Image (cartoon, helix red, strand yellow):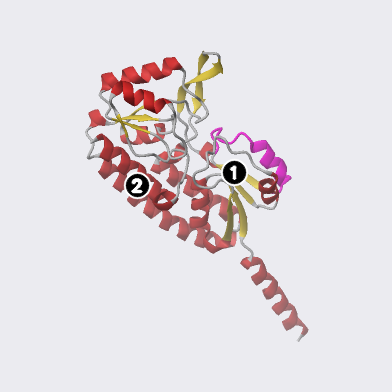
């Protein structure tokens, strides 16, 4: 009888442990979705950055750091997107696993004008952090998250693999859809003028040339020289539309459209998920691609 009671207590304890979800903190709207899709009911994900919030400007508040201190897995977009990595690592006290997802696959490097104020700028090479505009990279990120969750709960390996495979199949279908839509656009029209330089991964994957008004960060305001260069480029390249972003409305757009005759296209989601139809990764990508193709055709 005593042995049976002990066995029942052990089973109850094991069941209680299994029912306890893995606590995940995510500082990317994309990774918040990925973690929820892969983890299913075995994860409790806190998305610290909400859709429509500019991740370039985000700073964690004390409440965010408290949640991080209680998390078993902390997901970062990485590639220098988050300037507060050390704060998060300190908040975990070495107990949480901080994973810089984007650093686990290749980066694009680009030249960017850094404004020192007073009209003084210098060119520097920076790492592009906007990796999610490549569906191939989204698939890589899914596998990274799957593996990290499996390390934390090996007993759930089969469930995580099943969920990840289902999500990867949807991303495969999305990638095929993107290629089919882009194929409608002649190669000589694949010229994209955007608010800031966030679409280089998309450009590499789909054969576009990007002309960005601002730098790699939305905080990098363009110099008068850069605006003049963009105006000249739009005229010589015959670019038909300029794409603003959903989280901002650069004042220079009015000047550029007035000087070039190019029209302002639909807003693009450059720094993460949005609301409504763009609140999922698939929806965001489809909304961006549809806006680009329809405006440039």
What residue is shown at x 40% (from left), y 42% (from top)? 136
Residue 11, image x, y percentages: 67, 75
Q: Is residue 280 visible?
A: no
Label 2 and label 1: CA atoms lie apart by 28 Å
Which quadrant does the N terminus fall into? bottom right
Labelled disc at residue 99: 1
Labelled disc at residue 18: none
What residue is shown at x 51% (from left), y 13% (from top)? 119
Instruction: Determine whether 44 is above or below 185 in the image.
Output: below
In this view, which residue lies farthest toward the right? 2
Which dot, 2 or 1, sits closer to the camera?
A: 2
Asked if the magenta segment contains residue 26, the reply would be no
Pick the front one: 244 or 94 = 244
Residue 295, image x, y percentages: 27, 37
Q: Tell whether label 1 touches label 2 (CB within 8 Å).
A: no
What residue is shown at x 69% (from left), y 39% (from top)? 87
Residue at label 2? 286
**What's the magenta region?**
78-96
In this view, which residue lies farthest toward the bottom? 1
Q: Pick whichever of labels 2 and 1 is earlier in the sequence.
A: 1
Q: In screen coordinates, is 92 left or right of 280?
A: right
Residue 124, image x, y percentages: 51, 19
| Secondary element type, mark 2 | helix
Which quadrant does the C terminus fall into? top left
| Secondary element type, mark 1 | strand
**Number of marks present in the image shown:** 2
Q: In screen coordinates, is 119 left or right of 246?
A: right
Asked if the magenta segment contains residue 79, the reply would be yes
Task: Give neighbour class at mark 2: few <14, some 14-19, many 20+ (Cα, 10 Å).
Answer: some
Instruction: Determine whether 276 is above or below 209 in the image.
Output: below
């Amino acid at each position: 009888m005593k042995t049976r009671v002990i066995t029942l207590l052990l089973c109850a304890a094991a069941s209680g442990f299994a029912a306890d979800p893995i606590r995940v903190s995510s500082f990317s709207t994309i990774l918040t979705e990925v973690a929820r899709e892969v983890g299913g009911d075995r994860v409790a994900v806190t998305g610290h950055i909400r859709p429509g919030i500019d991740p370039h400007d985000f700073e964690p508040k004390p409440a965010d750091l408290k949640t991080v201190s209680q998390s078993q897995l902390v997901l970062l977009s990485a590639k220098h997107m988050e300037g507060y990595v050390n704060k998060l690592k300190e908040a975990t006290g070495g107990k949480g696993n901080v994973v810089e997802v984007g650093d686990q696959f290749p980066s694009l490097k680009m030249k960017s004008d850094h404004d020192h104020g007073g009209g003084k700028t210098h060119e520097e090479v920076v790492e592009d952090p906007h990796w999610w505009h490549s569906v191939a990279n989204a698939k890589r990120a899914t596998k990274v998250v799957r593996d990290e969750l499996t390390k934390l709960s090996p007993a759930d390996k089969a469930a995580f693999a099943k969920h990840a495979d289902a999500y990867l199949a949807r991303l495969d279908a999305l990638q095929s859809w993107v290629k089919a839509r882009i194929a409608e656009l002649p190669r000589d029209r694949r010229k994209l003028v955007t608010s800031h330089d966030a679409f280089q991964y998309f450009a590499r994957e789909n054969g576009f040339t990007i002309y960005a008004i601002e730098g790699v960060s939305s905080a990098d305001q363009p110099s008068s020289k850069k605006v003049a260069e963009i105006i000249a480029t739009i005229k010589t390249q015959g670019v038909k539309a300029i794409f603003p972003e959903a989280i901002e409305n650069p004042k220079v757009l009015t000047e550029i459209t007035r000087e070039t005759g190019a029209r302002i296209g639909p807003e693009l989601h450059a720094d993460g998920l949005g609301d409504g139809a763009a609140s999922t990764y698939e929806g965001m990508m489809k909304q961006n691609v549809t806006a680009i193709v329809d405006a440039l055709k």
